[in-house]
Image (cartoon, helix red, strand yellow):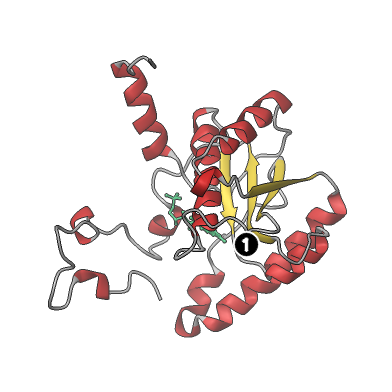
Amino acid sequence: MAQPFDEAERAAVYRAIYERRDMRHFVPGPVDPATLRRLLDAAHHAPSVGFMQPWRIVRITDATLRTQLHAAVERERLATADALGKRHDEFMKLKVEGMRECGELLVVALMDRREPHIFGRRTLPEMDLASVACAIQNMWLAARAEGLGMGWVSIFDVDEVRELLAMPAGAKPVAILCLGHVAGFYPQPMLEMERWAERRALGECVYENRWPQGGAEEDRPSTA
Ligand SMILES: Cc1cc2nc3c(=O)[nH]c(=O)nc-3n(C[C@H](O)[C@H](O)[C@H](O)COP(=O)(O)O)c2cc1C
């Protein structure tokens, strides 16, 4: 049987959870290949619905492709700003990606031909996406423990990225991951530091037995 974690190991797990940050500032420099391999393997050991393992990860090593992906994100960043209405200017001041500086760029996608995977997805087909998110979170936590920063960029047109990477129509890119060296980790979520949003109290998100009646706190938007 697997051994229990000792106190230091337990503390290390929680430290990685609390000190993981979505990073958008990187210092240039390559990621050690053995470290990258460990991080990819951490992603690959995530839980998945029906053990489907729907994650597909494309490592971007072509500089032109990186530039094209960045341009796609920039286009969608401007469209997002327009859609935000009165928060347009505030949004435009935020740094929402570090794609040009990071040592490694990875695109994570949902695999093609997901329809035959019914176990756990008959009523909740989006459990494939949940599984991919678990893989990304594994990598995020492992990267923090390795002292590397990671940022999830989801501001892009899906069809554009699919085409750029020659993905089949049934595959769906869901993340552009920036991975690399950082000067330091933000002490709080950057969106909190920039006063875009704040962390809700735990009690606002945890209920007992039934959904709270009469204007629960969750009705209050934390962002636009
Ligand atoms: C599914 C998902 C998509 C995200 N997309 C972006 C993004 O496109 N750009 C960005 O700057 N941050 C993105 N983030 C990072 C969030 O802004 C960040 O997780 C949140 O502000 C909390 O900060 P923390 O991760 O440092 O705790 C994304 C996070 C998740 C989970």
Q: Is residue 24 visible?
A: no
Q: Residues within 10 Å of mark 1 (few under 14, many from 20)?
A: few
**Viewer-nearest residue: 94 or 140:** 140
Q: Is residue 66 left or right of residue 19?
A: right
Residue positioned 18% across, 56% down in the render: 203
For residue 199, above or below residue 143: below
Side (left or right) of 11 relative to 180:
left
Q: Which corner quadrant holds the N terminus?
A: top left
Q: Amino acid at mark 1?
A: Glu
Expressed as whole percent of the image width and height from the top left, the position of residue 180 reads 64, 38
Q: Is label 1 in a helix, a strand or a loop?
A: loop
Residue tagged 1: 115
Q: Residue 165: image x %, image y %?
A: 80, 58
Place of residue 14 in the rendered image (x, y in percent of width and height, measured from the top left): 34, 32
Question: Which is more toward the observer, 7 or 28?
Answer: 7
Residue at the image position 18 percent from the left and 68 percent from the top: 211
Residue 172 seen from this side: yes
Q: Position of residue 144 (x, y in %)?
A: 50, 34
Left/right placement of residue 21 relative to residue 32 reads left
